[in-house]
Amino acid sequence: MKAVLWLVAAAALAACGAAPEDGSAERPNILLIVADDMGFSDAGAYGGEVATPNIDGLAAEGVMFTEFHVAPNCGPTRGSLLTGVDYHRAGMGGNPEVAADNQKGAPAYQGFLRDDVVTLAELLHDAGYHTSMAGKWHLGHGARNLPGGRGFERSFALLNGAASHWADQAALIPGSKTRYTEDDQLVDELPADFYSTTHYTNRVIDYISESASVGRPFFSYLSYTAPHNPLHAPDEAIEKYLGRYDDGWDALAAERAARLRELGLLGESQIPQSRPQWVLAWDELTPEQQAGRSRDMEVYAGMIDYMDQSIGRVLQHLRELDEYDNTLIVFMSDNGPSKTAILDYIALGGGAAEYFEQFDNRLENRGRPGSSTDIGPGWAYASATPLRLFKGYVAQGGIRVPLIVKPAGPEAQGRRVDTSVHVMDLVPTILELASVRQTSQWHGIEVAPIQGRSLVTLLEGDSDPAWMERGLGWEAYGMDAYRRGHWKVLRLPPPFGSGDWQLYNLAEDPGEVRDVATENPDLVAELARGWTAYAEANGVIHPNTPVAYSRPVSKGKY
Ligand SMILES: [Ca+2]
């Protein structure tokens, strides 16, 4: 039965140019797991104190990337993740909610995937894969841009960038309506016991069972919304962490730096980034403020812990189906930790602070339905240790995050790869491992060639010096960065940067502590030219008005 279905699928895909290169029917399943706003050093394998045995287990069996780069925000990273091209080229130059006037309507900033890109799901579906996704979508609301319109035959999706994790569907941004779809049909009401991570996990388990019952390999995209604001987690997940963070964010950052050194993820001579001067020291908070902030971090840790347990349920399901060894598993975060306060989201939506008053944020209710809290810049700073800044910024704390790849097959080794790689590299990697060709024509449409490079040689343990010569560019909210080899230039407005290009040698200074631009003007000019070429090639437009993240922040607010 399996062979007959495969022949039918092979005949169907031969017509659209996505045939497996070797005709092999024994292709790996693909499970792509994404955490939302999880910092570099939250997971145990990356130096964190949060219990993540399942994520750590994948790292022990697979390959752990230590220099993995993404876009600094959710939608942009997802644009690259699913298309293999730069996020501007994919139409996702910024979250559309915060686009400047001169960016609105520009193809690079339209806020949904362009028609002339093809998604990983579309290619794998054509190649006979059973394709599914559950969780955050954030790639558009129109019919063509819902999961089913972009190659996912089964889906349960949150279309928004964020919302309550509970059944109440409370919006994070006032005036926005929380929208869920199932197989592209709007879902009006969620089950009363809905919790995001539980529900998405259950759906993916069901979808994987479906693929097994029809005898097709699967591609499943498990797009968690944890640990994105608002912070919500089951009580039992939070309880484990009660009191754990009472020493505050300065102590936690120091603890993580020490653990990173033990793990070899931070060299003895490398200096971690220090707390931004506009963020309060822990001992500047009143005891009441400390109690509230401790609780917020307990909930955040509980969200990650519970997500890890849920990943464990999916892995167990694969073992029960005898599909674990034949599944390529990818785990990553979509951007660095978020400093954004709930009140900032409210301001973003043009809402008054009174909107906040509807929430019950008493200490005992934080994390439960009806609450709406965040980790703020203090904990975000600790979460990004040893890196600089957070989500929304092109400093390393916004764009360097965990990536673990467990290849299919029994030979995975628990290796570490320190080569600088990018989220757009995952599409060509997965296509190569699934024996599916890249294409410039898809169903009669000329599509953007993939800009990422396959990681397969790195996964197999080979090193290739050419990787170091590749230039990688970023633009977000008018802030710019360009990296080639160990060198990186970036340009951030005060108080985040100097307003001009800064230069860092990331091999010596991963925390971007020592700006060496003045000593190396020629190198700065050369890398700046690299950024200009990147910007021109990908349709970058600098905003003509200040947008979120580039606004100064006043000390005392937090
Ligand atoms: Ca995110």
Image (cartoon, helix red, strand yellow):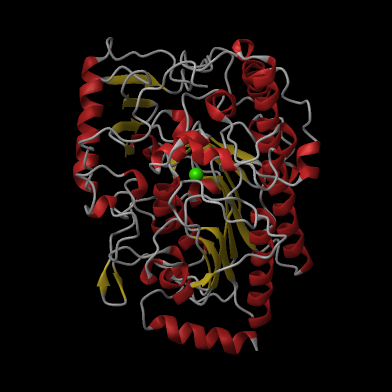
Above or below 236: residue 383: above
Above or below 376: residue 502: above
- Closer to the camera, 259 or 172? 172
Above or below 278: residue 78: below
Q: Is residue 27 visible?
A: no
Residue 302, horizontal then vertical, whole percent? 72, 40
- Closer to the camera, 214 or 335? 335
Answer with the quarter of the image where residue 328 lies.
bottom right
- Give me the residue at 66% from left, 44% from top: 232
Q: Is residue 468 visible?
A: yes
Image quadrant where one finds the N terminus: bottom right
- Give me the residue at 60% from left, 77% from top: 216
Residue 521, horizontal then vertical, whole percent? 22, 15
- Closer to the camera, 234 or 64? 234
Q: Is residue 539 left or right of residue 161?
A: left
Answer with the quarter of the image where residue 39 lies.
top right
Above or below 289: residue 316: below
Residue 72, horizontal then vertical, whole percent? 42, 38
Residue 277, horizontal then vertical, whole percent? 47, 13
